[in-house]
Image (cartoon, helix red, strand yellow):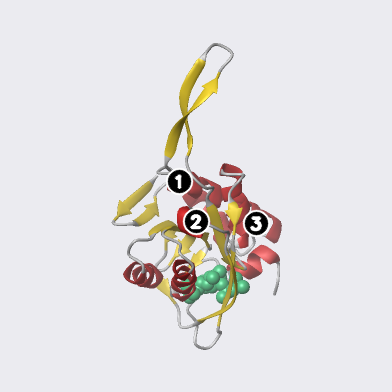
Amino acid sequence: MFENETNIFICKHPLIKHKISYLRDKNTGTNEFRKLVEEIAMLEGYDALADLPTEDVEIETPIEKCMTPMVKGPKLAVVPILRAGLGMVSGILALTPSAKVGHIGMYRNEETHEPVPYYCKLPEKIDERTIVVVDPMLATGGSAVDAIDQIKKQGGKKIKFLCIIAAPEGVKKLHEKHPDVQIYIGNLDRELNENAYICPGLGDAGDRIFGTK
Ligand code: PRP
Ligand code: URA
């Protein structure tokens, strides 16, 4: 489903592209927008988690005992970057219902476009978990880089970043600052505009998910 270039995975699945087109449409309302974000997160997450480690455990079927694989180790951590990342959490939890959820609060300063962090709470044993950071938009990359800095400071090691739309500028920055992080992208858009919005993009993801503005 994804084309991989050294930890940068760009989606090529027609169904994801189709759903992203509805997200872009300015006439798509809050309710439909939210559902689409959730569905795209689940579809991207399914492929992004294909390398989760498993271990064989003994199970007794109605016929006989057998050794069969189950996901290994402490449960996954899903970490949305607030606010817009919250819209993707339920999609990932649909795949791994017992995952733990952390939160990183951050918004962009409207003039400098630099991230302003205001909250961070991560699940315990974060160093042992696969961590899926979710945010629909990777624009300048400032928010993603700062969020992953915070996660690494608290011991996080195996980190995947899932977004729906990315600008080339943000992908470059995130990959340069955190080359070990696997970046999953629904669509790579053309560029940022003078306000650091993604073009053609979908506008302000937080406002469209929560119906603010
Ligand atoms: C949006 C988006 C990302 C960030 C991306 O959040 O959800 O977190 O911008 O931009 P960057 O790559 O240039 O850092 P925003 O600052 O609008 O906050 P909100 O989700 O609370 O509205
Ligand atoms: N944040 C958004 O929500 N949209 C953009 O295009 C850029 C940053």
Ligand 1's image quarter is bottom right
Q: Is mark 1 within 8 Å of ligand 1?
A: no
How far apart, in angstroms, are the residues tagged by discs 1 and 3? 22 Å
Q: Residues within 10 Å of mark 2 (few under 14, many from 20)?
A: many
Residue 49: numbered disc:
1
Examine the rendering and report whether any part of residue 36 can be seen: no
| Residue at x 49% of width, y 82% of height | 114
Horizontal side, residue 52 vs residue 209: left or right: left
Query: Quick check: marks 2 and 1 in contact, CB under 8 Å?
Result: yes
| Residue at x 62% of width, y 59% of height | 87
How far apart, in angstroms, are the residues tagged by discs 3 and 2? 19 Å
Q: Could you say which is closer to the camera, residue 13 or residue 24?
A: 13
Q: Is residue 70 above or below residue 108?
A: above
| Residue at x 47% of width, y 69% of height | 144
Nearest to viewer (mark 3 / mark 2)? 2
- Which residue reaches farthest top? 63
Q: Which residue is mark 2?
A: 132
Image position, residue 75 (x, y; %): 54, 47
Q: Amino acid at mark 3?
A: Arg
Q: Secondary structure at mark 3?
A: helix
Image position, residue 46 (x, y; %): 49, 44
How far apart, in angstroms, are the residues tagged by discs 2 and 1? 9 Å
Image position, residue 113 (x, y; %): 50, 83
Q: Sequence order check: which comes first, mark 1 or mark 3?
A: 3
Q: Tell me the quadrant of the picture where the N terminus can be found.
A: top left
